[in-house]
Image: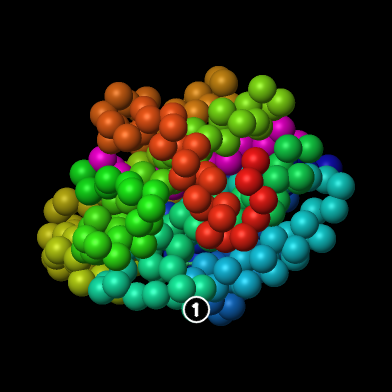
Amino acid sequence: MPQKTIVLTGASDGIGAAAARQLAPSPHRLILIGRSIEKTRAIAEEAGAEWFTADFARLDDVRALAEKISDAVGDDGIHVLANNAGGIFGDRTPTVDGFEKTMQVNHLAPFLLTNLLLPELRASGAAVINTSSIAHRLFGHIDVDDLDNTRRFSPNKAYGDAKLANVLFAKSLHTKFHAEGLSAVAFHPGTVQTNFASDSSSVMRLLYRTPLKHLLLIGADKGGDTLRWFIEGTPGETWLSGAYYDERQLTAKVNPQVHDADLAEALWQRSAELVGIPAR
Ligand SMILES: NC(=O)c1ccc[n+]([C@@H]2O[C@H](COP(=O)([O-])OP(=O)(O)OC[C@H]3O[C@@H](n4cnc5c(N)ncnc54)[C@H](OP(=O)(O)O)[C@@H]3O)[C@@H](O)[C@H]2O)c1
């Protein structure tokens, strides 16, 4: 009898793939989500896991993914949802849904997936773990009326905003559902040598895609181990629900907007409106 059902997105590469490998072999039921069929199947076979694919730049893919996961888990529920897929991208690109790609892939898609899976998550008193980034503090400043950054776009600003949205979303999940047993957390995994920034025109490319990376970045295994620590941890003991962590450290170094409860609620309502789900 598996102990937990764990759904992990962004499992086909980098931190997610490292965490998936480290979780295996496991008493848990592991459901890996990627974008590429070939890459996701390869990691899933290695980890002995089930898998599905979806392109988060297409919200219809996310809706179909939620249905497949829901059908697969049935009444067993989901005990951990790790929203880890994401990245920094290039110039301002609208998705087929009409939203800026960085905000959609990093925030709107996982926001939709999590909301569509809420019945399964609430039934199990689940843990939702959002892979955020220190970029939320360095570059983020959210205007809920311009989540797409039509007025002031740069790849760093778009990424910082999206990763700040990950923190605010975890806080809102805590505010709305912790009393009934659901927990949520956001964390920075470290500055990790992965495929990150490969599609980006951001100056971060210099750090991630040149020999500098060998000096300044930690290995994917270390980032994956931090994600695994959150996934296997017990909320309230290993980590605190509603909080933001720098790797495994609780930290007060957050973007000032993280403390704005009205903004967190406004972001939830605006995100729900954009992805077409009822407000809560
Ligand atoms: N690396 C760092 O230093 C660092 C620092 C802070 C935060 N993070 C965060 O850590 C998370 C994992 O990143 P990583 O460093 O492991 O980068 P990565 O090696 O590029 O892996 C990113 C994962 O997200 C998936 N993904 C990207 N775009 C997608 C889309 N449109 N639809 C569905 N899945 C998509 C990728 O799928 P494919 O395999 O198909 O590309 C891959 O599985 C991200 O949320 C990132 O923002 C990373």
- Picture quadrant of residue 180: top right
The residue tagged 1 is 96
Residue 125 falls inside the magenta stretch:
yes
- Whole-percent x and y of residue 61? 62, 72
**Extreme residue in the front direction:** 145
- Picture quadrant of residue 260: top left
- Whole-percent x and y of residue 129? 53, 42
Residue 35 seen in the current view:
no
Badge 1 density bin: few <14, some 14–19, many ≥20, Cα 10 Å? few
Q: Which part of the image, by quadrant, shows the C terminus?
A: top right
- Whole-percent x and y of residue 104? 45, 63
Q: Nearer the viewer, residue 192 or 105?
A: 105
Query: 216 left or right of 73?
Result: left
Residue range highlighted in magenta: 124-137
Q: Residue at x 32, y 26 (%)?
A: 251
Query: 145 left or right of 242?
Result: left
- Whole-percent x and y of residue 1? 83, 43
Query: 100 left or right of 240?
Result: left
Residue 15 seen in the current view:
yes
Q: Which residue is drawn at 36% across and 28% down?
A: 259
Q: At numbered mark 1, what does the secondary structure look like: helix, strand or loop?
A: loop
Is label 1 within 8 A of ligand 1 (CB to nearest ligand atom)? Answer: no
**Type of the residue with mark 1:** Val
Query: 65 left or right of 38?
Result: right
**Extreme residue in the right direction:** 75
Q: Nearer the viewer, residue 205 or 273?
A: 273
